[in-house]
Image: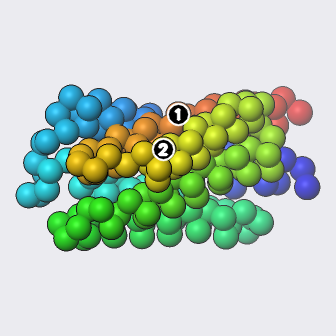
Amino acid sequence: MDINTRVQPFISHRILFLVRGLLLSMIGFSVFILSIVNPEFRIMSTTGWLPMIAFVLILSGILESVDSYAARESPIFLIYTNLAIVDLVTGIIILFELHNNPQRLVLLATSFLFIKGSFRIFAALHTRPPNFRGLILTGVFSLLLGVIHWRGMPANGVVAFMSTCLALELTIRGIVLVSFSLWLRKLSKCQINR
């Protein structure tokens, strides 16, 4: 299958990917820094930055639903639908379970990091964009964050550690979206020049 037919539905949305990537990376990096500088900050009567991350994941899931709708005629439709569901479900569970027992969210956050990292690696190998090695590297980084999160969870400060790991994942995903948008731009210029 030609690479153009796999990503053709996304070429017209490349500016939205760029904007979304910039916003995700800025929000993710800001929450990462804030969760290090002020881990005891209170949002919605909860200590930590996880409610902010939950809202970003829910919004990201909604936007990924739009991506899956754009790819409804493409073979990657189900992949984007699953990614949208993972973001939505993870964000909703974090938002509603955070008040009960944050330790119960460790496995959810770890699974989320594993899923996102694995997807990034497989997507890079499947589409082979010019920066596919960078995508594989960011996927491996997310997998490592998942392992660290799973094995290195501190006894106290669970919410702050979870916030830090998930904020890093959002930053990485934003950078990947910006990179994907720039690649789509290059691809569309090549199609125009033909």
142 or 125, which lies in front?
142
On the question of residue 21 being in view, the answer is no
Q: What amino acid is labelled 2 in the image? A: Ile
Q: Position of residue 99 (x, y in %)?
A: 17, 66
At 17% from the left edge and 34% from the top edge, which residue is drawn? 38
Residue, far front:
155
Q: Position of residue 33 (x, y in %)?
A: 29, 30
Per the model, the C-alpha gap separating discs 2 and 1 is: 21 Å
Which quadrant of the rendered structure holds the C terminus? Answer: top right
At 51% from the left edge and 37% from the top edge, which residue is drawn? 172
Which quadrant of the rendered structure holds the N terminus? Answer: bottom right
On the question of residue 51 being in view, the answer is yes
Q: What amino acid is labelled 1 in the image? A: Ile
At 50% from the left edge and 69% from the top edge, which residue is drawn? 85
Q: Position of residue 147 (x, y in %)?
A: 53, 48
The colour scheme used here is rainbow
Circle 1 — which element?
A: helix
Residue 61 sits above or below residue 49 on the image: below
Q: Residues within 10 Å of mark 1 (few under 14, many from 20)?
A: many
Q: Which residue is mark 1?
A: 175
Quick check: 167 left or right of 86? left
Residue 121 sits above or below residue 194 on the image: below
Quick check: 179 left or right of 55? right
172 or 59, which lies in front?
172
Q: Position of residue 187 (x, y in %)?
A: 76, 35
On residue 148, the disc is 2
Circle 2 — which element?
A: helix
